[in-house]
Amino acid sequence: MKPHHYLKNLENIKSQFDPQSTEEKNKLLKILEVEEFHNPLHVKRYHDVLNFLFAYPDNKKIFSRVSRLLASFHNRSDLLQLKSSLVNSGIAGTDIEYQFYWPMARWLANKYPRDISILWDELDSPDKFMVILPLLLSHPESGVLDILQHLSPGECVSILKHKKDSDAVYIISCFVEAFSNDREREAIHDDINLSYKLTANKNTPSIANSRIPVKNIAYQSESFDRKRPELVKILKQQQFEVDFISRARGKVYIDLARKTMLTHERDLNAFSYGNPADVRCFNFSDGHQIIANSMVIERRYLLHSTYGFLNIRNGIPIGYFQIINLFNTAEIAFNLFSPFRGGETAKIFARNLAVAHQAFEVDTFILDPYQLGHGNEEGLLSGVWWFYYKLGFRPIDNDIIKQVKSELKKMSSRPGYRTSLSTLDELSSENLYYNINGDLNNCNLMDNLDYIPLGSSQYLSWESCSKKEQRISATVLSARQLTGFQNPGKMNTQQKLMWESWSPMLMNINGIKRWPVVERKKVADIINARSEHDEQCYVNSLNKHGRLKQGIINYANKLANWV
């Protein structure tokens, strides 16, 4: 029998945990340890199944064997021969090539300065880079490009940088020195679409080394429960323990999340801009953990709270979840990494909803079109739209509702009928919603909140641009007087940022000056809470302020109608 046949057999029984299957897994693992593959896809599949068995081991024997196989995987002869075809696989010993956004590029340059470089041959627009390059140079260097103008971007950088620095480290350090804040750096860096290469060594991120140690390994002795979970019951009754994590440990967890996203070709702002001072761990009885973190204060949205959830089993990340939360309603994103699919997807998804509901006060969940497969080929092919529909998520768009009824009728009358990809793309073109109480009447109240920054811009532009900073200061002063915020000392940077962000909106909320004094003072408390590390304190306070909630929604609707 050829090696890939043994592999296929192992894949077929990986989710079976009866004694016979356990014995067969051990036999197949022993055989595959010494076999060689000649197809890079088979190497990747073998690596995937080992990671699955690490997360869901039958017993100590299998866990120990799988741990040893993963630890030595980078030395496999077939991997060494095929590694050039396994770029971006996340396998130890293979390189990673990606157009990293600014926060990840900067983190990698700091963390792995000797291993990161720029792929100049993949630069989308060399001319655009050469326009930006003078902005990155110091004043004494300002005329150097007149001499180097005949050279390519990569050649220019190789001359400008120190010989001990990589080109990536040099460019990242130039961005840090040339611009005063990450918003400027991110806007310009991401616009030139630099492609980076992280050359593999024993210390660079891989799926196998992106793990945390756990005290007790959870063994899987029973087959997976593939029944469709009852969301209402799970959201209300799911039990877990919560640990609030120290800042030092929080940094370790956020680094883990970044490495995980890197090795799975994903990017999530909640992790890229993760806040180590606001991390908590939700522990379940079967070895499943959810590590949640908010974003650093300066990168938060005006109103919404954002938390990223890293899902872990037996210390290895298996997927992620994100909530963008406001007024007990959250836009969500969920992804279970490919090695761990085919097991407990629905159960894991439901647990993330439960954490969002119980710990972060979310009652209504929204899935956007991309999450449902619209413009997302992987999602369409997986039929993810029906996965969420069967769990209880529903459309509110009338055309989509009619189309769903038509598809359900075809399914009931034509056994074996499958929704076409084109129809799935149409179905996924609008949001799906789930409310724990089954009430979808007000689930789209937040649709117009994106207009609020436009209103702030209009408010601050009533006078000439040269006076905008003065206008902002005057608006903050008016908002503080309105809310009775007595500040005996100088506001810190975070407080100042939040008051500057909120004040134009507050001054445009209809009738706020007539609110009781105590209600206006609570608004000041909410703004100050927004500048604290624990975002959930802000969320709790905002959710309780009915007048402010309705005032914000009314203002957003007014702006939408005006536009």
Image (tube, grey):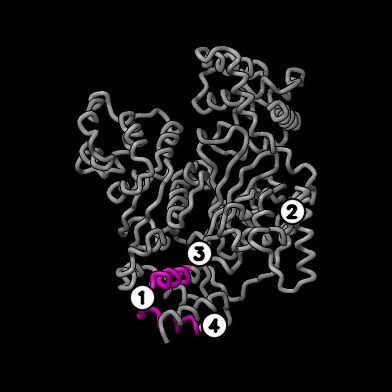
Read off the magenta span: 24-51
Q: Upstream in the sequence, badge 1 or badge 3?
A: 1
Q: Which label is found at residue 21?
A: 4
Alpha carbon distance from label 1 to label 2: 46 Å
Q: Secondary structure at mark 4?
A: helix
Mark 2, other Cα within 10 Å: few <14 / some 14–19 / many ≥20: many
Residue type at mark 1 is His
Q: Upstream in the sequence, badge 4 or badge 3?
A: 4
Q: Is residue 31 magenta?
A: yes
Taking 493 as reference, is 279 above or below it?
Answer: below
The reply to whether callout 1 and callout 3 are in contact (CB within 8 Å) is no
* Res. 548 in view: no
Residue 136 % position (x, y): 32, 31
Q: Which residue is mark 2?
A: 394
> Is label 3 or label 2 in front?
2
Alpha carbon distance from label 4 to label 3: 21 Å
Q: Upstream in the sequence, badge 1 or badge 4?
A: 4
Q: Is residue 468 magenta?
A: no
Q: Which residue is mark 1?
A: 38
Q: Which residue is mark 3?
A: 314
The reply to whether callout 1 and callout 2 are in contact (CB within 8 Å) is no
Q: Secondary structure at mark 2?
A: loop
> Is label 4 or label 3 in front?
4
Say how many tags the image has.
4
Residue 237 % position (x, y): 72, 57
> Is label 1 or label 4 in front?
1
* Res. 520 in view: yes
